[in-house]
Amino acid sequence: MSLFQKKESAPLPPPNHIAIIMDGNGRWAKKRGLPRTAGHAAGAESFRRIANYCRELGVKYLTVYAFSTENWKRSTEEVGGIMTLLGNYLREALRDMEKNKVHFVFFGDLSRLSPELRQLCLEAESASREYDVQVNFCLNYGGRDEIIRAAKAFAQDVARGEKTPEELDEATFSQYLYSASVPDPELIIRPSGEQRTSNFLLWQSAYSEFVFMDVLWPDFGPRELDEAIAQFHRRDRRFGGAK
Ligand code: IPE
Ligand code: IPE
Ligand code: MG
């Protein structure tokens, strides 16, 4: 076959659900002698780009880790900067809803956010309900916190006589998590070079494929996502079975 006849193989379809730990903003800023908040602003830009690209690719669910239950340990200046950026982003998302066409869902305990930010989250969620592509925004989210909340909610249903302990199985428990009705992510990507979950999707990641990449989140673009998806397709997923 001549070179010209050689057909490019079509790219494999992306996973249905991709989750990303958006890490490395601080280091990106430090490398440039900028304040950490500038790194978070660049990270927000990266998120916009990747959310659009995921929609183009046909990804159904994108879950992003934006702020963890542990991130409150950072300086008031940094936390305040992140919250301001989030507020700006949500106002912009509300304005551009018809252009972005994504359904926003928030995973996390929003009660610790400012009333204004909480309100913006609720508005973004309800105003975007009609769209099919779902972006799960993890805000003041912790995997352990999510599991404890689910356990408490189930215990309350038992105390009220609506459930019995015998009914509890994996499918039932899943319904008490923030991710109720969302399929588990097939692929979890962590840029920045760190190789840990940092309390992200502890329950849902039981059989996810992890791809760790050396790039910092603000430098993560469509090319890096393509590479992560390609790595995912090279994995042999066995789910405990044998071949
Ligand atoms: C991720 O970037 C954003 C948040 C955790 C809010 P970091 O701020 O953790 O960046 P590094 O890890 O310090 O480079
Ligand atoms: C995980 O990153 C949280 C988010 C990206 C929102 P961290 O930077 O907080 O995680 P550690 O501290 O390196 O484990
Ligand atoms: Mg970090």
Image (cartoon, rainbow, N blue to C red):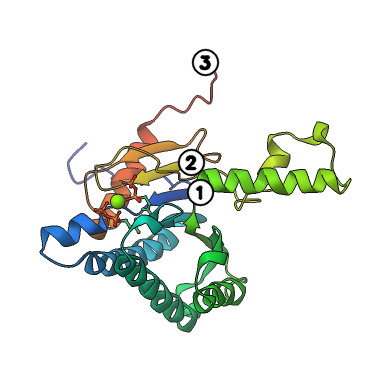
Report the residue that reaches farthest toward the bottom: 95
Q: Callout 2 environment at 10 Å: few (<14), some (14 to 19), or many (20+)?
A: many
* Element type at mark 2: loop
Q: Quadrant of the N terminus?
A: top left
Residue 108 percent coordinates (x, y): 54, 57
Instruction: Determine whether 118 is above or below 109 in the image.
Output: below
Q: Callout 3 environment at 10 Å: few (<14), some (14 to 19), or many (20+)?
A: few
Residue 239 percent coordinates (x, y): 53, 26
Residue labelled with disc 3 = 242
Residue 150 percent coordinates (x, y): 66, 46
Name the amino acid, label 2. Answer: Glu
Residue labelled with disc 2 = 186
Which is nearer the eye, 232 or 144? 144
Residue 99 percent coordinates (x, y): 45, 78
Q: At 52% across and 15% down in the image, what residue appears?
A: 242
Asked if disc 2 is less than 8 Å from ligand 2, the answer is no
> As drawn, is 189 to the left or to the right of 157?
left
Residue labelled with disc 1 = 16
